[in-house]
C-alpha cells in the first residue's frame, strides 16, 4: 500500500509499473477475491484503485485494510464517466512516487465496476501517450459467477467483453452449483487461451492471478484487437476521457449511450435513521418477490434499530441473496448511516429509495406508509395501481 512519507529519492520505472485490472459482472465476487488477496505479501506495496457505479461508495469500506493506498473512484463508471479521473489518478500517483511524496509502489490493481467495459479502461493505460511511458498493462483478471454467469453472458455485452479480454478467469461460487460444464464451454468459446482458476482454490495467490506477463492482444480473439483499436480511435477523437454528462445528484448512473444499457440504473440511498430488522426483512421480501428479475445487484451497510453500532452487510446478486453478516462495528472511516446501492433494470426511477424510506418510516411527500404497503404489497410506488 502507498503511504504519505517523505523521501529524498526519486524512483525510475524503466519498464513501467504493472497495472492489473480486476473485473467481472455485478456481484461476481471481485471485492471478495480482493479481500482474500489483500494480505498477500506480493501485494504489500501495491496501490489499489476501486471504482463503483453508484455515487455512494461501499466497496472501499468493505476491503479489509482499507485506508492507506486505497483510492476510491465512485460516482461513475471507469469505462466512461470517470475515465478521465483514472488517467489523472495514475498520473498523479506516478508523479508523487517520482517526487518522493509517497512510498514507491510496485504495482497498481484497479477493481472496476461490474458494468465496466474493460476495453476503454485498458486503452486508458496502454493508449495514453504519457501513461504508456510509465505504466504497462499486466494481468487482466475477470471473475465469473458460476450461479449467474450463463444468464449474464447471454444478456450483457459488457460481461462477454470482460471475459473475452481476460488473461485469467476466476470462477466464483462454484460450490453453489452442481457443475460448471456449460459455463466453461461458453467461456472457452469467448476466450480459449485464458487461464481458469476457481475462487475457492486454497493456494490461489495474487501472483498466480496477476503476474501473467505483459498484456498481449494478439493472444486474444480478433474481436479484442479490433475493440482495442476502435477504442483508440474514440480516445483520439476526444470521446474517451471523462467529460460525459452527469444528471445532477439524482442517483442515476451518468449514461454514455454507447457504453451502458440505458435500461440499467443505479439508486444510491443514504439514511441516518435506523431501520428495524423486521422492516428491513419486509422491504427485502417485497423488492425480491415483486421485482426479483429486475434486480441486478443490491449491496449495502444497514444501520439496524436493535443495535445501531453494529451494521449489517447486505448482498444480493440477481436472485441470489447472501446470508447477511453483522459487523462488530462500523468500518473505519465510514459514517454511521445506512448506505445502500441498488442496480436495477427497467425499474421506475427512485422506486427502491421510496420503498426503503417507507419501511424505514422516513417521511416523504406523497409516499405510502409502511402499513399501507404491507397491507397491500401490490400498491408499490411508481407502479400503476391494480384494480
Ligand atoms: N458462496 C460464495 N459466495 C461468494 C463468492 N464470491 C463472492 N460471493 C458473494 O457474492 C456477493 C457479491 O460479492 P462481491 O465480492 O461484493 O462482488 P463484486 O463483484 O465485488 O460486486 P460489485 O462490485 O457490486 O459488482 C457477496 O455476498 C459475496 O459474499 C464465492 O466464491 N462463493
Image (cartoon, rainbow, N blue to C red):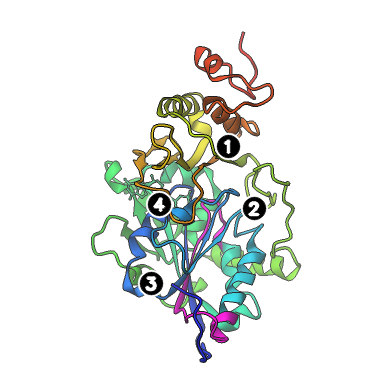
Q: Is mark 4 within 8 Å of ligand 1?
A: yes
Q: Position of residue 104 (x, y in %)?
A: 47, 82
Label 2's element?
loop
Mark 2 surroundings: few (<14), some (14-19) or many (≥20) residues within 10 A: some
Q: Earlier in the sequence, mark 2 or mark 3?
A: 3
In the displayed image of the protein, which residue is found farthest to the top?
387
Marks 2 and 1, how far apart in space?
15 Å
Tag 4 residue = 29
Q: Identify the element where label 1 is drawn.
A: strand
Observer-side mark, 3 or 1, equals 3
Confirm or deny contact between disc 3 and disc 1 (CB under 8 A). Answer: no
Mark 1: few, some, or many residues within 10 Å (few <14, many ≥20)?
Answer: some
Q: Earlier in the sequence, mark 2 or mark 1?
A: 2
Residue labelled with disc 1: 345
Check residue 259 in the rendering and tell me which mark sits there, or answer none.
2
- The span shown in magenta is 95-118
Report crowding for label 4: few under 14, some 14 to 19, many 20 or more residues within 10 A (C-alpha): many
Quickly name the residue at label 3.
43
Q: Is residue 82 above or below residue 306?
A: below
Q: CB of mark 2 within 8 Å of CB of mark 1?
A: no
For the point 36% across and 65% down, the residue is 38
Real-space Cα distance between discs 3 and 4? Answer: 19 Å
Amino acid at each position: 500500500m502507498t503511504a504519505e512519507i517523505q523521501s529524498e529519492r526519486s524512483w525510475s520505472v524503466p519498464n513501467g509499473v504493472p497495472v492489473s485490472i480486476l473485473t467481472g459482472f455485478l456481484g461476481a465476487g471481485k471485492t471478495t477475491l480482493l479481500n482474500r488477496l489483500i494480505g498477500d505479501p506480493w501485494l504489500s506495496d501495491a496501490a489499489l484503485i476501486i471504482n463503483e457505479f453508484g455515487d455512494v461508495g461501499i466497496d472501499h469500506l468493505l476491503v479489509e485494510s482499507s485506508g492507506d493506498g486505497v483510492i476510491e473512484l465512485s460516482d461513475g463508471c471507469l469505462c466512461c464517466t470517470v475515465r478521465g479521473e483514472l488517467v489523472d489518478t495514475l498520473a498523479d500517483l506516478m508523479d508523487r512516487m517520482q517526487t518522493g511524496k509517497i512510498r514507491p509502489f510496485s504495482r497498481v490493481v484497479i477493481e472496476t465496476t461490474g458494468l465496466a467495459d474493460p476495453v476503454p479502461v485498458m486503452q486508458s493505460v496502454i493508449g495514453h501517450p504519457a501513461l504508456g511511458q510509465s505504466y504497462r498493462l499486466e494481468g487482466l483478471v475477470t471473475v465469473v459467477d458460476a450461479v449467474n454467469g450463463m444468464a449474464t453472458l447471454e444478456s450483457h455485452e459488457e460481461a462477454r467483453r470482460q471475459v473475452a479480454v481476460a488473461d485469467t478467469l476466476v470462477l466464483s461460487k462454484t460450490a453453489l452449483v452442481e457443475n460448471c460444464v456449460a459455463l466453461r464451454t461458453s467461456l472457452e468459446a469467448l476466450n480459449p487461451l485464458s487461464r481458469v482458476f476457481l475462487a475457492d482454490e486454497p493456494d490461489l495467490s495474487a501472483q498466480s492471478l496477476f503476474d501473467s506477463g505483459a498484456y498481449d492482444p494478439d493472444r486474444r480473439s480478433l474481436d479484442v484487437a479490433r475493440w482495442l483499436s476502435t477504442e483508440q480511435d474514440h480516445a483520439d477523437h476526444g470521446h474517451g476521457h471523462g467529460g460525459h454528462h452527469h444528471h445532477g445528484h439524482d442517483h442515476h448512473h451518468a449514461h454514455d449511450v454507447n457504453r451502458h444499457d440505458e435500461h440499467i440504473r443505479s439508486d444510491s440511498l443514504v439514511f441516518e435513521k435506523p431501520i428495524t430488522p423486521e422492516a428491513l426483512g419486509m422491504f427485502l421480501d417485497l423488492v425480491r418477490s415483486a421485482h426479483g428479475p429486475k434486480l441486478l445487484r443490491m449491496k449495502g451497510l444497514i444501520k439496524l434499530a436493535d443495535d445501531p453500532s453494529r451494521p449489517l452487510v447486505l448482498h444480493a446478486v440477481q436472485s441470489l441473496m447472501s446470508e447477511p453478516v453483522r459487523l462488530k462495528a462500523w468500518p473505519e472511516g465510514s459514517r454511521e448511516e445506512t448506505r445502500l446501492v441498488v442496480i436495477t433494470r427497467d425499474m421506475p426511477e427512485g422506486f427502491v429509495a421510496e420503498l426503503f424510506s417507507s419501511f424505514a418510516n422516513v417521511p416523504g411527500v406523497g409516499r405510502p406508509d409502511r402499513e399501507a404497503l404491507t397491507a397491500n404489497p401490490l400498491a408499490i410506488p411508481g407502479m400503476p395501481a391494480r384494480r
